[in-house]
Amino acid sequence: MKVLVDSSVLLDVFTQDPLWARRSEEELIVHAERDLLAINPIIYAEVSVHFSTLEELDEVLSPMDFERLPLPYEAGFLAAKCFLAYRRRGGQKHAPLPDFYIGAHAATEKMALLTRDVSRYRTYFPSVQLIIPGREASEVRAETPQGNLGRDSFVSEYTRRL
């Protein structure tokens, strides 16, 4: 299985987050042993702000450890539609958030997503299998809605087809 690794999980480890570092690192180790870990340019950019040089960043996000994937145009389209649904539901951000691109990338390429940011991904990308550090998959499915976009039927139908 190919697993897109969200910047939240990588930053937990790189910044030694007191609450999440251990759980995120354990989850990365488990999936590195059995799956292909991947990142895209958005994840790379989000993580880069915590490193002084490109060489340092490339050392921790080595292509040997993380496949570097391009962001498909279809993901950009889906990200924009989901962002529009978010704004219609009262979301306050005025530009598409990186999370929408990351979720759309996982959805269009049928990848699992290793992340701590459950609610937005579950709401707008219900077809994406979420892997949450320190949580069993059944716990996450039981506590989160499976994509409730209401009047945004285009997005609901589009993500269901994925």
Image (tube, rainbow, N blue to C red):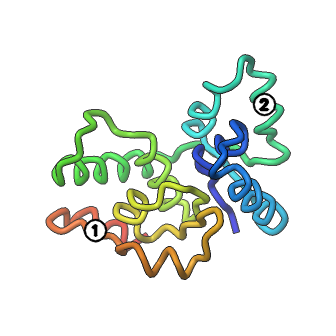
- Say few, some or many: other residues with alpha carbon within 10 Å of mark 2 (under 14 / 14 to 19 / 20 or more): few
Q: Residue 110 appears in which quarter of the rendering?
A: bottom right
SS for tag 2?
Answer: helix
Residue 161 sits in quarter: bottom left
Q: With 47 as the anchor, is 119 left or right in this view?
A: left
Total marks shown come to 2
**Kind of residue sitting beneath label 1:** Ser
* Mark number, residue 108: none
* Residue farthest to the front, as pictured: 18
Reply above or below: 46 against 23: above
The answer to whether residue 157 is above or below residue 87 is below
| Residue with the most extreme top position | 52
Quarter holding the C terminus? bottom left
Label 1 to label 2: alpha-carbon separation: 37 Å
Q: Which of 91 and 157 is in front in this view?
A: 91
**Is 81 situated left or right of 97 in this image?**
left
Q: Which residue is drawn at 39% across and 40% down?
A: 97
Q: Name the residue under label 1.
A: 156
Residue at image location 59% in from the left, 64% down from the top: 132
Instruction: Name the secondary structure under disc 1.
Output: helix
| Relative to 56, 141 lies left or right | left
Q: Quadrant of residue 12?
A: top right
Tell us which disc is closer to us: 1 or 2. Answer: 2
Amino acid type for the residue under numbered disc 2: Asp
Residues 162 and 9: in front is 9
Q: Does residue 118 appear left or right of residue 78 in this picture?
A: right
Residue lying at 79% horizontally and 36% vertically, measured from the top left = 60
The residue that appears at 24% across and 66% down in the rendered structure is 149
Q: From what the image shows, is residue 135 above or below residue 121? A: below
Of the 4 image quadrants, the one containing the N terminus is bottom right
Read off the residue under disc 2.
Answer: 58
